[in-house]
Amino acid sequence: MPNNKRNTAFNKIQPLSLSHVNYCLTETVMSKKKILCFGELLLRISPDLSGDWLQLHQLPFFVGGAEANVATALARWGLQPAYFSALPDNEMSVDLLKYLQDQGIDTSAVILRDGRLGLYYLPKGKDLQHASVIYDRAHSAFAQLQPADINWENIFEDVAWFHFSAITPALSASLAAVCEAAVIAAGELGIPMSVDLNYRARLWQYGMTPQQIMPSLVKHCTLVMGNVWATEKMLGIPVDILANEGNTQDQYIAQAARSATALMEAYPTVKAVANTFRFDQPGGGISYYATLNTSNITEVSRTHTAAAIIDKVGSGDCFMAGLLYGHTQGHPWKQTLEFAAAAAFNKLFIESDATTSNVATIHQILLSNES
């Protein structure tokens, strides 16, 4: 397979505020450049709700998968991501790998094997967490991965950061074991890790609950992203308030701080917890903001609002990428959070699974909101 490994260092990109602060990469990231994202590559099939796709003989599709979306964003923003997955050994996979490589993603670790490509069907305008999503990923090449198939020490060569999401261990017991082997190996090699606690109820179908699986993975991580309700589902950390029940923003921010504090106390390796809040407004439109907590700070992003959006899919992945973009370059947490929230908000207006916006576009959103 072609290898798009690059030897260039991370691009130095102008910070998103107007202040001129000298940011440096951490020593680890400077010497080991790759951010490795691990997960299943999917195709999203998006028929229109009117049923015109039947007459037109056309089904719009997008290349996706949570971790691939993160890698795509990081590449677009000038960093050096790598992507590890398993794909069927056929010509379609060759095309997909070429597509990822053209985005600037190192795919040299991807395994080609027996199986099929995972799919999901989501009509246009629908949210991935709602019942309209149809997953068709059983028996995919990725779903059949076993711990013995992977030499993590080789996979982690020249890797500075490892990212995965809760979607992968939700697929099967064997993939949960693969994830556990990955985080143990990364920990032994001193590689920091991040996890997105994205909860998909329809995926946990193999007899284990998230709370039986996720704690053993989260305990190895440095950075955790999600929302307070997903954290409750995944880790059993209680939430005192319900979404869209007339609560104030201050109440949600306080809940995020309580959840983050409890998470960091339970898992001392975790040094930062980010939570997103996206609410539909009664008169239409949405509001979006995020929080980030460490042991001694609470940061809150500005609130972004819009009367209408185009595509909700992938906004959380874009937020995760924004956190990694800022943190691996040594940006302050406040600046990192603002960039991540603006990137996620911007993704709501892009019809695809991954963002197509560059850093300058996201900076412009922040500057326009300051005026």
Image: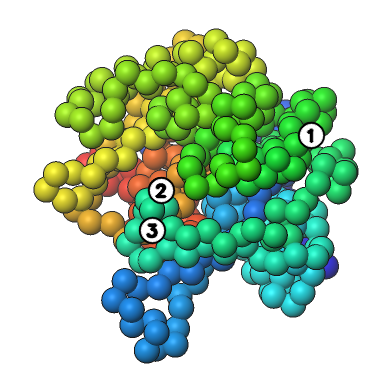
In the image: residue 328, left or right of residue 309:
right
Using a 10 Å C-alpha cutoff, classify the residue at mark 2 as few (fewer than 14 neighbours), some (14 to 19) or many (20 or more).
Answer: few
- Label 1, secondary structure: give it: helix
Q: Which mark is residue 181?
A: 1
How packed is label 1: few (under 14 Cα within 10 Å), some, or many (20 or more)? some
Q: Can you tell which quarter of the image residue 325 is in?
A: top right
Q: Position of residue 324 (x, y in %)?
A: 57, 38
Which residue is at 44% across, 87% downward?
57
Q: Quadrant of residue 311?
A: bottom left
* Front-lying residue, 232 or 205: 205
- The kind of residue tagged 3 is Ser
Q: Amino acid at mark 1?
A: Ala
Residue located at (41% from left, 27% from top) = 228
Figure quadrant of the C terminus: top left
Name the foreground residue: 25 vs 271. 271
- Residue 129, which numbered label? 2
- Give percent across and percent down for residue 54: 39, 84
The structure residue drawn at horizontal position 60% and vertical position 49%, both measured from the top left corner, is 67
Spatial CA distance of label 1 from label 2 is: 28 Å
Amino acid type indicated by mark 2: Gln
Q: Which mark is residue 84?
A: none
Residue at which label 3 appears = 132
Specify whether residue 23 is in view: no
Q: Is residue 323 above or below residue 368?
A: above
Q: Nearer the viewer, mark 2 or mark 3?
A: 3
Q: Secondary structure at mark 2?
A: loop
Indicate the secondary structure of the residue bearing disc 3: loop
Whether residue 146 is visible, yes or no, is yes
